[in-house]
Image (cartoon, rainbow, N blue to C red):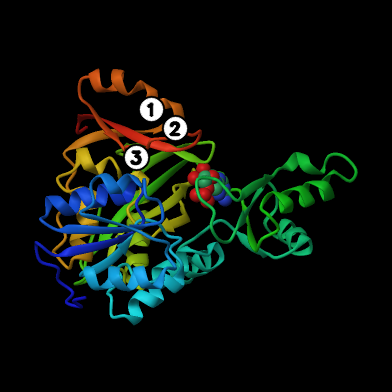
Amino acid sequence: MATAPIVAPGGTVGVLGGGQLGRMLAMAAAQLGLKTDVLCPDPAAPAGDVAGTLTHASYTDEAALAAFARAVDVVTYEFENVPAETVAFLTSLGAVVRPGALALEKAQDRLHEKEFVNGLGAKTAAFHPVDDLASLEAGLSRVGRPAILKTRRLGYDGKGQTRLTDADSDLPGAYEKAIEFAWAEVGAAPSILEAFAPFEREISIIGARGADGDIKLYDPVENVHRNGILKTSTVPARIAEATADKARAVASDILGALDYVGVIGVEFFVLNDGAVLVNEFAPRVHNSGHWTLDACTVSQFEQHIRAVAGWPLAEPARHSDAVMENLIGEEISAWRSLAEEPGACLHLYGKRDIRSGRKMGHVTRLTSRG
Ligand code: AMP
């Protein structure tokens, strides 16, 4: 395994995780003349259709990880729940992992993530660590209701979280029951109670930092979730320039403080006075950046590959306005009419089984830049 920070054309990028993000990373790498080796426990992973090599192994299989480390020039990942031990093991073998362990450590634990973001001077919703029913009750007194209880680790797409609303306290005993119910809902796991942010809209910033410290940010994008899952991402976001600037500054600060290399997705709540609260960040390419494939001169996937391969970042210029819509579960059945729709940019992930809530593809509709 070479440790040189620059991976020249012909070199190999190792990707941990073989979902749709790994698939689109592999396609972007191929465009730049790079090969990919995708390590993933699922032999039918979407990235398998396009990766140079699919290493079918668990993230804790040390023999497979050692062979993977020897075969690739740099390692990246497409999901933030890569076990810390996997990254530590690969690093111990001399592998360069980008983004590094610090970004993963902060992003894997909602409490550490929020403390880190607050430490940079950026705001989040008020929060309180919860380890049992007593601390949940103390948290409710502190952050008020409505509030959201979330597991500190392993939550995604609205999973591992539950709401506590104002109505919970109307009947005698209902308040206690609601607390017990909420705690059971998140699996009685170490959690965090967050104040409900009365947001006007949700936005995200997709940004990148190169190995040389150069930072490039895409335009802020406005996101709409349905059942906790991203449904649409629209650019431009309907926000004031001053709000966009605040979000950009926070994203840049996070990238710098993590000594980050790669693409990051930072999600924000925008309040009606224009203030921005950080919801969370994902140390990887992000679903709310898929529009960049069709509306920009460089996609988030190419930008990520450029960063982790030690190449210069490209200017993330946007040539069109765009609405990206996720195709979730059965919505994939409309593929034929979407394929017929003039101007619709269709991206399907090659997943065999349709399941409710599963991201099967996305479609991006472009209009002239307003
Ligand atoms: P998360 O998995 O934390 O990103 O939450 C998924 C979605 O739930 C967010 O995109 C919001 O729409 C909503 N949500 C999460 N946390 C809060 C909060 N503190 N206040 C208001 N809405 C929230």
Image quadrant where residue 362 sits: top left
Q: Name the residue: 27% across, 74% down.
A: 96
| Front one among 98 and 243 | 98
The residue at which mark 2 appears reads as: 354
Quadrant of the image occupied by residue 207: bottom left
Say if mark 2 contacts mark 1, CB within 8 Å: yes
Mark before the other along the chain sequence, 2 or 3:
3
Q: Is residue 214 left or right of residue 260?
A: left
The answer to whether 40 appears left or right of 272 in the picture is left
Badge 1 element: helix
Q: Which residue is mark 1?
A: 332
Q: Is residue 250 visible?
A: yes
The residue under label 3 is: 237
Graded by Cα atoms within 10 Å as few (under 14), some (14 to 19) or many (20 or more), the crowding at tag 2 reads: some
Amino acid identity at mark 1: Ile
Amino acid of disc 3 = Ala
